């Protein structure tokens, strides 16, 4: 969510105006995100915005501070579609017990929650509400439809990790779709429009190079927190992709290919002046190992690895241990 959106909400509430929130501001309420769900849609956000008052200002101010501190945090939304059920529906025989109280009330709510599970809201939450508020802000949603009468959605207050797909191969097509689905910002790069086009990469940012090579890649800066997947067609430009990623010092770089081909790429990369220690940063072959062979299967392996890298980057060791223990994997 953008800073100017949060600042505008605070200004409107201080002036006694109804804030103007749109699905462009809160993508969790967009038509794409809510398709097929009869309980929630773009109009739901407008209805929730109309319920906000001056008492909600601290929630949005805390969200602004999270942006300043680059905190791993979310703005969450409690959506009530059946008030009676939301309040009366309590624990079942399967879920963890939170008492005989359902939701604290039958009204919608906007709240702030961060990875430290600090919650800021204009009204008290019941124990079950707290459970749901924390659950929906894991990254960004888990069991948000667990209880009847209400649902929960959230919008991250932090940016997406950028994933560069160097090469518009068939595997890259599958990676682009899946990486976008799990919340990455995908940038696909190639020199041939027959492979790099809107039909093959409908959700990705596309960069079309010129000259039939990847030479222009050298003029494009990457950020230290970017991820790079070297997936060039026929592996023809894998050395250039690895050199560019390593020279830009990206957080993660992985390359597809067999050991023999990768040894050749190794020699070409080092011949270009890259140090052996930097070459060792290249994950090869890219992706988790579980027998994937087809482009779609390889995409699952690759994106699963990207998710794991992001998880380890964003969450402290203590937080990861706590999460693994909660799942019985510690």
Image (cartoon, rainbow, N blue to C red):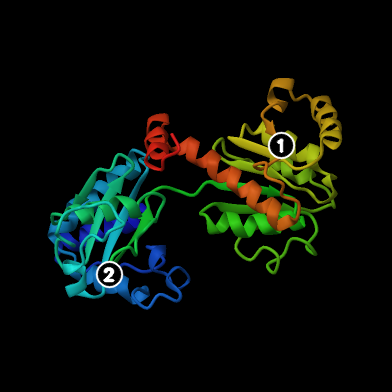
- Residue 291 in view here: yes
Name the quadrant containing residue 49: bottom left
Name the quadrant containing residue 235: top right
Position of 293 relative to 90 (above/below)? above
Image x and y of residue 31, in percent: 44, 73
**Disc 2 versus disc 1: distance between alpha carbons?**
51 Å
Q: Residue at x 85, y 52 (%)?
A: 212
**Which residue carries the number 1 mark?**
244
Marks 2 and 1, the one that precedes in the sequence: 2
Disc number at residue 142?
none
Image x and y of residue 222, in percent: 61, 40
- Residue 220 in view here: no
Q: Are marks 2 and 1 in contact (CB under 8 Å)?
A: no
Image x and y of residue 210, in percent: 79, 53
Name the quadrant containing residue 26: bottom left
Count of numbered marks: 2
**Which residue carries the number 2 mark?**
148
Q: Residue at x 84, y 52 (%)?
A: 211
Image x and y of residue 171, in percent: 73, 54
Secondary structure category for the residue under label 1: helix
Residue 10 vs residue 237, the one in the foreground: 237
Position of 71 relative to 14 (above/below)? above
Of labels 2 and 1, the one closer to you: 2
Q: Quadrant of the C terminus?
A: top left
> Is residue 14 toward the left or the right of residue 320 in the image?
left
Q: Residue furthest front?
A: 93
Q: Residue at x 33, y 75 (%)?
A: 39
Q: Dot 1, how many residues are within 10 Å of its Cα: few (below 14), some (14-19), or many (20+)?
A: many
> Is residue 214 toward the left or the right of residue 155 in the image?
right
Q: Quadrant of the N terminus?
A: bottom left
Q: Dot 2, how many residues are within 10 Å of its Cα: few (below 14), some (14-19), or many (20+)?
A: some
Secondary structure category for the residue under label 2: loop
């Amino acid at each position: 969510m953008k800073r100017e959106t949060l600042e505008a909400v605070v200004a409107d509430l201080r002036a006694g105006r109804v804030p103007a929130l749109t699905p462009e501001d809160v993508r969790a309420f967009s038509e794409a995100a809510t398709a097929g769900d009869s309980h929630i849609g773009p109009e739901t956000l407008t209805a929730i915005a109309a319920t906000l008052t001056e008492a909600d200002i601290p929630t949005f101010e805390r969200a602004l501070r999270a942006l300043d501190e680059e905190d791993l945090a979310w703005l969450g939304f409690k959506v009530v579609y059946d008030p009676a059920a939301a309040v009366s529906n309590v624990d079942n025989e399967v879920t963890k017990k939170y008492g005989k109280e359902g939701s604290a009330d039958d009204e919608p709510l906007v709240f702030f929650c961060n990875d430290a599970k600090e919650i800021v809201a204009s009204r008290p939450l019941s124990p079950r509400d707290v459970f749901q508020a924390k659950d929906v802000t894991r990254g960004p949603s888990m069991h948000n439809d667990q209880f009847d009468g209400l649902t929960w959605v959230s919008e991250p207050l932090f940016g997406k990790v950028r994933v560069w797909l160097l090469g518009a191969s068939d595997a890259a097509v599958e990676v682009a779709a899946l990486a976008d689905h799990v919340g990455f910002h995908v940038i696909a790069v190639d020199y041939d429009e027959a492979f790099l086009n809107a039909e093959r990469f409908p959700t990705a940012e596309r960069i079309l190079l010129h000259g039939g090579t990847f030479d222009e890649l050298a003029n494009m800066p990457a950020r230290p927190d970017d991820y790079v997947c070297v997936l060039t067609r026929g592996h023809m430009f894998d050395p250039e992709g690895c050199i560019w990623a390593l020279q830009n010092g990206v957080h993660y770089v992985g390359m597809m290919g067999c050991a023999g081909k990768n040894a050749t790429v190794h020699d070409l990369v080092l011949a270009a002046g890259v140090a052996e220690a930097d070459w060792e940063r290249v994950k090869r072959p890219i992706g988790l190992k579980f027998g994937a062979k087809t482009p779609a299967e390889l995409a699952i392996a690759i994106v699963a690895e990207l998710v794991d890298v992001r998880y380890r980057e964003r969450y402290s060791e203590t937080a990861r241990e706590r999460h693994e223990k909660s799942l019985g994997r510690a």
